[in-house]
């Protein structure tokens, strides 16, 4: 399939728009409630709110209801990076124009190399909760927005569009973050979560390990997909019971499907095809795609409760449809993928849509 041809106009239009955007990192947004410093990424748990019974006391949880007053500037500027750099990398792939690679390097240098503006390679202060904790393991999900950034670095490096010293510095940052993710208590906590958080940990580790050249972690992720993610998350009918139990069952099911499909796309080999893996009772990606496809094609037949927020914002151009369509040679999946919105602007949609430039994953 000619992904480059399919997406060329969209890619170039976005990249040209971003040519006027200067690099902007977390250091431009000091977080007064953070226990860390200016180079430390900070965010606050989405679903935590002031307690009406104790307004100045510890926050309380309202699942699925995002608090608009929480600190989100670092996450938003990371999402901005995840839009800009992959757009430049994709534009370089489809045009060969070195200007796009040059602009990608500027943003990457600001975020990961330059001492004055770089982000520290850890998430010690992510998804904090006022009055309760200064950071949590679940905050590691925030760096799903570095997945396509890492892939962009790998793509640009392989094409020779980046100086070797910059490539080594960037690989070094992701290798250090990978070590933190796989050894710190927060990383272990996130790894062991049984819902989409555990899926996101595996995808992040896999992509960052590919960039860093860590074969041990790649092998570990393949085994974890088969021995932990599939048996614990996918039911015999292909549904995701842990996501269906949430207050946004539709969005979370779509999100987890995309993440698991991306793991299959990144880690499958001829000898170890995760797309075809299934438990003895038949649970696996093929069943998961078969379960969700009808509800992506026609959301009106969704038999579960609607999401408490943003139900009207989904589906978008779910990457699972493309990856699975290619893996299973299913033209219906790909045809539906083509019809869906590839560039949502709603913040909630962007938050759960980390892979937006398929040319970096299919042709790369």
Image (cartoon, rainbow, N blue to C red):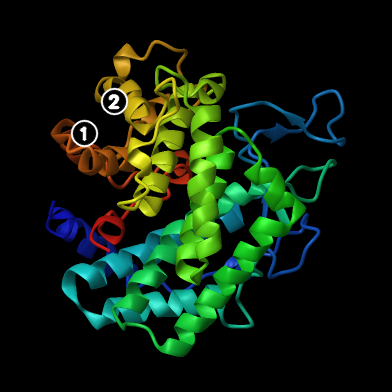
Q: Earlier in the sequence, mark 2 or mark 1?
A: 2
Q: Which mark is residue 346?
A: none
Label 2: which secondary element: helix
Label 1: which secondary element: helix
Image coordinates of residue 326 in percent, x first then y, are 21, 43
Q: Are marks 2 and 1 in contact (CB under 8 Å)?
A: yes
On the image, which quarter does residue 41 sit in? bottom right
Would residue 38 be visible to someone looking at this image?
yes
On the image, which quarter does residue 362 sit in? bottom left
Residue position for label 2: 293
The number of numbered badges drawn on the structure is 2
The relative height of residue 112 versus residue 135 in the rendered view (above or below) is below
Would residue 127 be visible to someone looking at this image?
no
Label 1 Cα crowd, 10 Å radius (few <14 / some 14-19 / many 20+): many
Q: Tell me the quadrant of the picture where the C terminus can be found.
A: bottom left
Tell me what residue is drawn at x 21 percent, y 79 percent: 97
Image coordinates of residue 79 in percent, x first then y, are 48, 56
Rounded to the nearest angstrom, the CA distance separating label 2 from label 1 is: 8 Å
- In the visual, does 69 lie left or right of 301? right
Image coordinates of residue 359 in percent, x first then y, are 25, 58
Tell me what residue is drawn at x 52 percent, y 50 percent: 221
- In the visual, does 207 lie left or right of 300? right
- In the visual, does 176 lie left or right of 14? right
Residue position for label 1: 333
Tell me what residue is drawn at x 70 percent, y 65 percent: 40
Image coordinates of residue 24 in percent, x first then y, are 52, 70
Q: Nearer the viewer, residue 54 or 293?
A: 293
Label 2 Cα crowd, 10 Å radius (few <14 / some 14-19 / many 20+): some
Tell me what residue is drawn at x 50 percent, y 79 percent: 109
């Amino acid at each position: 399939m000619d992904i480059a041809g399919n997406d060329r106009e969209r890619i170039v239009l976005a990249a040209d728009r971003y040519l006027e955007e200067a690099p902007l990192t977390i250091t431009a947004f000091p977080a007064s409630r953070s226990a860390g410093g200016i180079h430390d990424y900070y965010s606050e748990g989405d679903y935590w709110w002031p307690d009406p019974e104790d307004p100045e006391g510890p926050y309380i949880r309202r699942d699925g209801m995002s608090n608009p007053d929480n600190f989100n500037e670092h996450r938003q500027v990371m999402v901005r990076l995840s839009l800009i750099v992959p757009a430049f990398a994709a534009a370089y792939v489809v045009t060969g124009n070195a200007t796009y690679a040059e602009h990608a390097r500027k943003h990457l240098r600001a975020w990961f190399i330059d001492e004055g503006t770089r982000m520290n390679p850890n998430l010690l202060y992510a998804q904090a909760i006022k009055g309760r904790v200064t950071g949590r393991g679940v905050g590691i999900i925030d760096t799903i927005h570095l997945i396509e950034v890492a892939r962009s670095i790998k793509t640009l490096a392989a094409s020779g569009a980046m100086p070797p010293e910059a490539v080594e510095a960037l690989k070094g940052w992701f290798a250090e973050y990978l070590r933190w993710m796989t050894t710190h208590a927060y990383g272990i906590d996130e790894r062991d979560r049984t819902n989409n958080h555990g899926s996101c940990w595996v995808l992040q580790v896999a992509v960052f390990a590919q960039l860093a050249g860590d074969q041990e972690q790649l092998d570990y992720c393949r085994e974890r997909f088969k021995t932990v993610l599939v048996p614990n998350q996918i039911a015999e009918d292909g549904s995701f019971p842990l996501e269906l139990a949430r207050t946004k069952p539709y969005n979370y099911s779509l999100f987890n499907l995309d993440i698991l499909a991306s793991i299959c796309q990144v880690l499958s080999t001829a000898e170890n095809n995760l797309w075809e893996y299934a438990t003895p009772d038949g649970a696996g990606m093929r069943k998961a795609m078969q379960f969700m496809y009808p509800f992506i094609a026609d959301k009106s037949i969704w038999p579960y409760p609607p999401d408490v927020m943003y139900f009207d914002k989904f589906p978008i151009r779910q990457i699972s449809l493309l990856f699975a369509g290619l893996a299973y040679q299913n033209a219906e999946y790909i045809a539906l993928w083509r019809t869906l919105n590839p560039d949502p602007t709603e913040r909630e949609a962007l938050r759960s849509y980390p892979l937006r430039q398929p040319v970096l994953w299919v042709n790369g």
